[in-house]
Image (spheres, rainbow, N blue to C red):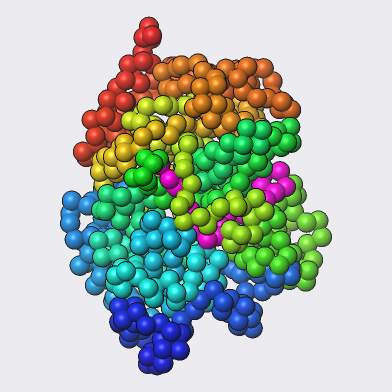
Amino acid sequence: MAVIEPALDGAGLRNPKVREYVRYWAELTGAERIEVVGASDDARLIQESVEAGEIVPAGEGVYYSRSYHMDTARTEERTIVATHSTADAGVYNNWRPSSEMHELLEERMRGASAGKTMYVVPYLMAPPGSPLEEYGAGVELTDHRTVVLHMIRMARVGVEFVENLADPNSFVRAVHVTGDLENLGQGTAEDQRYFVTVADERTILHFGSAYGGNALLGKIAHGLRQAAYDGWASGKFLAEQFMLIGITDKETGRKYHICGGFPSASGKTNLAMMLPPDALGERYQVSFYGDDIAWLWVDPEDGRLYGMNPEYGVFGVAKDTNETTNPTALQSVDAGTGALFTNVAYNEITHEVWWEGRTPAPPADVTGWRDWKGNLISVRPEGSDEPWSHPNSRFTTTLANVPNIAADFEDPRGVPIDGIIFGGRTPDREPLIRAITDLAEGVYDGLTLGAEATFAAEGVEGLLRYDPMSMRPFMSYPEGAYAAHWLKIIGQVRETPIFAHVNWFQRDHEDGHYLWPGYRDNLRPLLWLMQLMNGEVTGRQTPVGILPTKEELNLDGVEITPGDLDKILSIDAERWRREMAHREQHLTQFDGLPNEIWAAHRRIAAALEPGAD
Ligand code: SPV
Ligand code: MN
């Protein structure tokens, strides 16, 4: 039995509700020790983890760990949103009654931390002083030290974040118990894992993993599922899986902010950390706010939409991160950053790390290299094409390490949002950019977002699926109500931000090459969008939105053939008509979808009919 009170006293944790919560779960899980942590404990925890062999050095002040080989990604089938009301069941939230889930999770967690330390991790998902601060406080209890190291990088961590709450009970209870990873039957009929958000009790109970969003509960369980539910229940805000960037025009002095949703692992981190292309670098500066979560609200004073990133770090996909795709990410994990790598390949002699796409070919000299499972590369059979790193291997680093982090990223007021974009990996049909000025059509576009399946979740690669607003895995309440809540929140603004759908991934249907160079050049269509918003260009109206003309898009220094350019700036009405039939089926699943959304769908479908004009 852990000695609880002295540990809490010693850490200055006085909030009686937090103490009661810690006591309850310490007893239930049977943890041997309690330790309250804050960000200032990082160096000591790193040292303890190195001594215990849980992490190893990967250069100076940078570390590496492997997760259990059956525990490498989110598991959507095992992720559940529970509440007391059947009315909260949606298509994607895997709704179950709270009573059932409480019992099940308590049964799994009972005694499951015996012999281990339970770390008490008070955190805040918001810049301190934010108007949404009251929704950001939480206390994660975890029995895994590497998870603590990740939490310290990904969230603001310390007792101070729960000591002065207006209501001492208003923190998210986030319990993480790892379980016996080797005996959980992952992926079988006897799977023991459960990742549950009891949304109307603001309680998160995750059992059976120590990886990513399954275990760092501030991130997607609180930052997305719980916060989306809170935003809806309070009627005050939206919590979305969105990146957030700033674009400064140094010539005019204007600064724009764009946020947007892209399904997991479809280049959102690369976009968020983007630098301007060389030809535009003199004039424009792109600053980074966040790559995965944005909370959005309307300021009643000025009637503008504001956004902020509630996170404090980046948990980025390593695969394909290199000097071309994301140079800023590489700098943010350099020596001295305290970055953590997970499940990439590791050289036990030189302490280097490598992942697929880091360089065109893997290191030629395989001496010392081990793959993400810990197996020596040198003993692989000749011609083996097994990847060295796991496709969902990650780097974890704090926001402040990102070289182009926005100067005001901690401003509690957030930043005014000018544009909301959606995009995925779509090999055909979707042009480079199409702007949408109507609110219902913008929300409709988000709801019909589709992409190829991702490595970030267990599933079939290469399969196209709808991922509304990129929130499918994080949806916590019914989709009809979700759409209505979007219309309500954005409907309050005095000036609707401009929406757009973007696609960097259109391919040639014959040889498969990408039609658009992507990466840093993606700034160009975003600049066009801001010009359109300002009335500086007019674009070309199509049934699915406004497209740039060739002349309007700044293409200084871009290598693209006229044929490819035509293709990405046009729409194939016949192909779109087929898509509209799929969309109809997709939207029909959602009960109570607002009439405005159906009207937008019908308007676009009618405009696509031959002869319509
Ligand atoms: C995602 O999969 O979208 C992530 C990583 O951001 S995880 O936190 O594991 O969900
Ligand atoms: Mn994500």
Is residue 74 something one can see in this rendering?
Answer: no
The range drawn in magenta is 305-328
Q: Quadrant of the N terminus?
A: bottom left
The residue depicted at 62 percent of the width and 66 percent of the height is 340
Residue 187, horizontal then vertical, whole percent: 41, 61
Residue 63, horizontal then vertical, whole percent: 66, 69
User: For residue 101, what is the image quadrant?
Assistant: bottom left
Residue 11, horizontal then vertical, whole percent: 46, 85
The one nearer the camera, 598 or 107, is: 598
Against 563, residue 23 (above or below) is below
Q: Quadrant of the C terminus?
A: top left
Q: How many marks?
A: 0
The extreme top residue here reads 611
Residue 15, horizontal then vertical, whole percent: 34, 79
Q: Is residue 55 magenta?
A: no
The residue depicted at 30 percent of the width and 64 percent of the height is 202
User: For residue 536, what is the image quadrant?
Assistant: top right
The residue depicted at 41 percent of the width and 50 percent of the height is 295
Against 156, residue 118 (above or below) is below
Q: Say whether residue 610 is left or right of residue 350.
A: left
The one nearer the camera, 40 or 374, is: 40
The residue depicted at 30 percent of the width and 78 percent of the height is 17
User: For residue 364, what is the image quadrant?
Assistant: bottom right
